[in-house]
Image: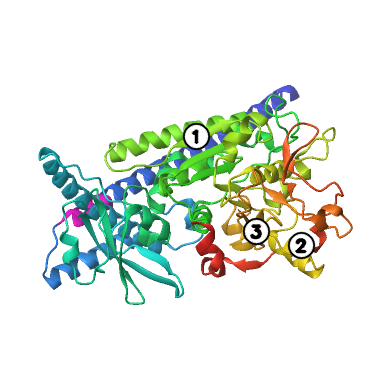
Amino acid sequence: MPPPKKYFALAKKLFEMARAGFGVYSYWYHQRKQHYNRQLDQQQRQEQRRKRRRQVEEISSSEEDDDESQQHHHESKRRRLVDTPVTTRAPTSLAAKQTWRQVSLDSWDELMQMRQRQVIDADQQQQQQQLEQDGIMIPRQRFSEGTRVRKHFPGEGWFEGCVHSVRWAGGDNASIMDDPDVPQNVVLPPTPQWIYKLELDNGRWDLVNEAALADIAIPDGNSHDPSLYSFLEFLALWERLGAERIEKTSTVRRANSRVETGDSDTQQNAQYGRILPQATDLVFHILRLKRTDIFLDVGHGIGNFCLQAAYCRGCEARGIEVVRDRFNVSQQFAAKLEQMSLETDGERFRKPGKVLLRHGDLADHANHNWLARANKVVVNNFNGVFAERMVTQTASQWHLDHYIAGLFASMHEGSILVSLSDLQLGPSRREVNRWRQDNNLQPSPNASFFEVVKVELGEAGQVFSWSTSCKAPAVAYLYRRVRQDPNLRTACTLCCNIQCKHSKLGTPIPAVALNREGKAVVGTCECKMTLRSNRRVPHITVAEYLSSREYREWGR
């Protein structure tokens, strides 16, 4: 008698369950095997890295040999090491821009430079300890031989050169005067200090102290201050923080769609976007950022701009961020970076600048004076993220770009602001004076409170972290507060309406005004007319700007 049909159905069900279970087991076994293989490969790569690193350190720490064959052996061995990608892993932010070989060579050169600086620092420390025992204190020099400089001679123009030698002179020590190339009319300082002998391209020799050299030094790789971090050294520390992984989390990007009510009552969203480290360094070159400056990043995000400014340029770096979560991340990054710096340097030679980050609203009157004390400012407002697209429907016509314009008008003369979007500041002094000449009016230094230059930074994919494939040019607007009548207490402008009485009389109009909400914005004449529609901003490349008169004069 054949078995009942229900047994066939049960057997079929059991067979399907067994097949499903075997499929699950096969998938699990395959995933575990892949995970094990990945771990094994990672361990092998780490072991290879450690082995290569030990070999590189042995070569770098070996004594110099005058034998040409021995030097050739070290050079060939170095190239074999750096040609292997596993030896030095390129940072992810530079991997798309440089080859493995170039990154490895740069890392090797950086390692050799660090080794040389350590030897020099050790010798100087030993000499200073000996002098301290004798009751003499010599501070550490900031600049080294070979630092490029650009100096102006009245009636002759600008000439470039380099630091030829460095001497500790002053007081009763007149040994530097024995140099036949030193001008006879040079007067040594009354107190001992570092004196730098300059060799200029026009054949002249000159002597300057550290304060004067800081103003004329060309901010490039040749003028690296050994008490600060170079670009690659800072980039290595920044990569260890894991910023690219953290900035992709909801903690950082939650405010892209909605800002918490406790953070801001006028801002609807705060779009996150970071400028890449190599573009950040380019902005520092454009600003001629130096240790004596006060740097400000409006909307500092996770704090990368401020930290790089403090560690690579040594200046006081300030930042303000409206989103609480991003501010907390930046605080953690700053503390972690300081800890890593102390672990690698041990509070010996590195002297980065002070980092002051603040959580708050840019338009808040309580933050206005603190922000206005900066003289080098960066605003990442690309693509209108601080304009109409971030305000609420119930808010007034004012947005962050208006408040940034009011902040710039409140800053000191000579301050520079880099904005990635055109600000509503009205016409520049050059445009107002041109209009006054066309209308038979006398040009005036009080025509406007700023000048502007439009500089192309390169492709957007090489500047911003959110547009790696974008080929459109990224443009920066450089605004500089110009010098006006010293009798004026605030920045002023002149009216450009030929029918207005203030225009004919040349009445100065305060550039800073308070709107109905009591926040600082750019003021206008009572006739409400500007040359906004006729504005022409010079558009140049970075190379053209670095060789222009504005670059030589603006960043001083």
- Of the image marks 1 and 2, the number of the one nearer the N terminus: 1
Residue type of the residue flagged with mark 1: Leu
* Secondary structure mainly formed by the magenta segment: helix
User: How did the renderer colour the structure?
Assistant: rainbow
Is residue 414 among the parts visible in the rendering? yes
Within the image, what quadrant is residue 510 found in?
Answer: top right
Q: Residue at x 37, y 65 (%)?
A: 148
Placement of the N terminus among the 4 image quadrants: top right
Task: Answer whether residue 45 is magenta in the image.
Answer: no
For residue 278, side relative to residue 43 (left or right): right
Q: Could you classify mark 2 by the number of other residues whose Cα lies within 10 Å: few (under 14), some (14-19), or many (20 or more)?
A: few
Q: Which residues are magenta?
A: 52-62
C-alpha distance separating marks 3 and 1: 29 Å
Looking at the picture, tell me which residue is in the foreground, 418 or 10: 418
Within the image, what quadrant is residue 550 found in?
Answer: bottom right
Locate residue 527, reporting x and y percent.
Answer: 87, 49
Residue type of the residue flagged with mark 2: Arg
Locate residue 45, reporting x and y percent.
Answer: 35, 48
Q: Which residue is the site of mark 1?
A: 356
Locate residue 174, reporting x and y percent.
Answer: 17, 58
Q: Which residue is the site of mark 2?
A: 535
